[in-house]
């Protein structure tokens, strides 16, 4: 993955009536990367994808693909591949004809069309099915047809709008792996829209977290998960617990937060500007909590009210009177989780220095 810019949004705004779906947004998508737009419904991620595709025109700012301004360029001249949530296959056409459609619209010679369709059929593992109709194939195979149709034109940018949402869990997971392998092998710049956090974390080179038409944070999956820069990102991505604490001290890089009898080291960036003794909220992942016997010095205490078996781990829900949300979630190994039965009073300790604190 190179550092060159494939898609550039420069202060882009898009309004629908009086509502700004995208507001003064700037973003660079690197050539060859898979960038995921992740956020809650209505955050603007699909609108942003439609702006790249040319289905919408920006009301302000500019969009460039490979250095070429495309604000007024029609969709069919943008050299993009599209995979929709519904696949949008032609039911009366064969698999081969569906895939070849974009090439025929470009008036390519029949020999070239046959060769390129054959190559992409092999790429998406649909050899031998070229004469079937979409309705004769499974959901996963139909998804491969849609992907092949988008890739066969050799797009500069591949746009994916929640392409796995109609698949069952196991098929969805296998198709995610296949897509990532194909994308890496071809090196095609890809913008992926999803509301599924695990999908975004597993597939992406970088993730752009969106809310209310703005990008709140952009970074690698690890950066987004372990170092959220604001409360919204910390709350939105992954499961998280919030405990009330007090800022005890701060320097250039680290801060100390007191939670119950525990003192936790956190990055200072998110609490910069606060003074010692001010209240803060400590954000802690479920896997960063440990349970101890009640009565021992710890960060908090509570009662186990539910245990959810998840195979390799067990999620314990703990009622906690002094926690802002009333409950904590602890994620323990299966062997450790079985030690704590429902109704047990427990102490809660924090086993990491990777927690994040924000002003209350």
Image: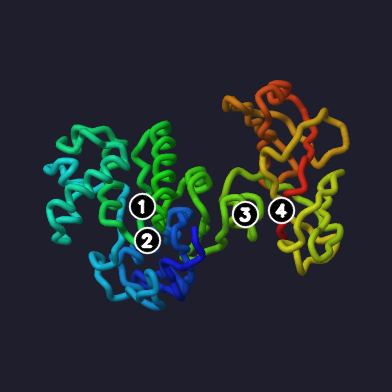
- How many marks do you count on the picture? 4
Q: Nearer the viewer, mark 2 or mark 3?
A: 3
Task: Write down the residue under mark 2.
Answer: 49
Could you say whether the residue bearing mark 3 is in a helix, strand or loop?
A: helix
Q: Residue at x 81, y 66 (%)?
A: 252
Closer to the N terminus: mark 2 or mark 3?
2
Residue 222, relative to residue 296: is it above or below?
Answer: below
Closer to the N terminus: mark 4 or mark 3?
3
Say whether marks 2 and 1 touch (CB < 8 Å). yes
Could you say whether the residue bearing mark 4 is in a helix, strand or loop?
A: strand
Label 1 crowd bin: few (<14), some (14–19), many (20+), radius 10 Å: many
Q: Nearer the viewer, mark 4 or mark 1?
A: 1
Label 3 crowd bin: few (<14), some (14–19), many (20+), radius 10 Å: some
Closer to the N terminus: mark 3 or mark 1?
1
Task: Write down the residue under mark 4.
Answer: 356
Could you say whether the residue bearing mark 1 is in a helix, strand or loop?
A: strand
Q: Residue at x 42, y 73 (%)?
A: 12
Tag shown at residue 256: none
Q: Nearer the viewer, mark 3 or mark 1?
A: 3
- In the rendered structure, the answer to whether residue 220 lies left or right of residue 258 reads left
Q: Position of residue 215 (x, y in %)?
A: 52, 64
Quadrant housing residue 277: bottom right
Instruction: Give the residue at the far bottom of this rendering.
Output: 60
* Alpha carbon distance from label 4 to label 3: 13 Å
Q: Position of residue 125 (x, y in %)?
A: 30, 37
Label 4 crowd bin: few (<14), some (14–19), many (20+), radius 10 Å: many
Tag shown at residue 223: 3
Closer to the N terminus: mark 4 or mark 2?
2
Tag shown at residue 161: 1
């Amino acid at each position: 993955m190179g550092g060159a810019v494939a898609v550039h949004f420069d202060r882009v705004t898009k309004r629908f009536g009086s509502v700004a779906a995208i507001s003064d947004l700037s973003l660079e998508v690197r050539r060859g990367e898979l960038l995921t737009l992740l956020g809650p419904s209505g955050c603007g991620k699909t609108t942003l994808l439609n702006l790249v595709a040319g289905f919408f025109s920006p009301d302000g700012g500019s969009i460039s693909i490979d250095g070429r301004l495309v604000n007024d360029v029609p969709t069919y001249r943008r050299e993009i591949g599209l995979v929709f949530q519904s696949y949008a296959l032609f039911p009366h056409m064969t698999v081969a004809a569906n895939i070849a459609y974009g090439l025929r619209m470009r008036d390519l010679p029949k020999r070239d069309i046959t060769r390129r369709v054959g190559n992409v059929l092999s790429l998406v593992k649909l050899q031998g099915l070229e004469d079937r109709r979409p309705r004769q194939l499974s959901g996963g195979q139909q998804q491969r047809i849609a992907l092949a149709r988008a890739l066969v034109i050799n797009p500069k940018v591949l746009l994916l709008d929640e392409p796995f949402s109609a698949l069952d869990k196991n098929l969805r997971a296998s198709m995610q792996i296949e897509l990532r392998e194909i994308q890496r092998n071809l090196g095609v710049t890809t913008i992926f829209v999803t509301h599924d956090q695990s999908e975004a974390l597993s597939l992406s080179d970088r993730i752009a977290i969106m809310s209310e038409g703005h990008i709140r944070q952009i970074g690698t999956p690890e950066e987004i998960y372990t170092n959220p820069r604001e409360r919204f990102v910390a709350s939105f991505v992954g499961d998280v617990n919030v405990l009330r604490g007090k800022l005890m001290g701060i320097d250039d890089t680290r801060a100390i937060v007191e939670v119950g009898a525990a003192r936790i080291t956190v990055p200072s960036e998110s609490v910069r500007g606060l003074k010692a003794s001010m209240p803060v909220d400590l954000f802690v992942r479920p896997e960063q909590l440990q349970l101890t016997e009640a009565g021992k010095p710890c960060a908090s205490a509570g009662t186990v009210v539910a245990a959810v078996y998840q195979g390799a781990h067990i999620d314990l829900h703990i009622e906690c009177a002094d926690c802002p949300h009333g409950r904590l979630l602890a994620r323990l190994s299966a062997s450790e989780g079985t030690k704590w039965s429902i109704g047990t009073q427990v102490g809660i300790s924090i086993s990491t220095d990777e927690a994040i604190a924000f002003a209350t």
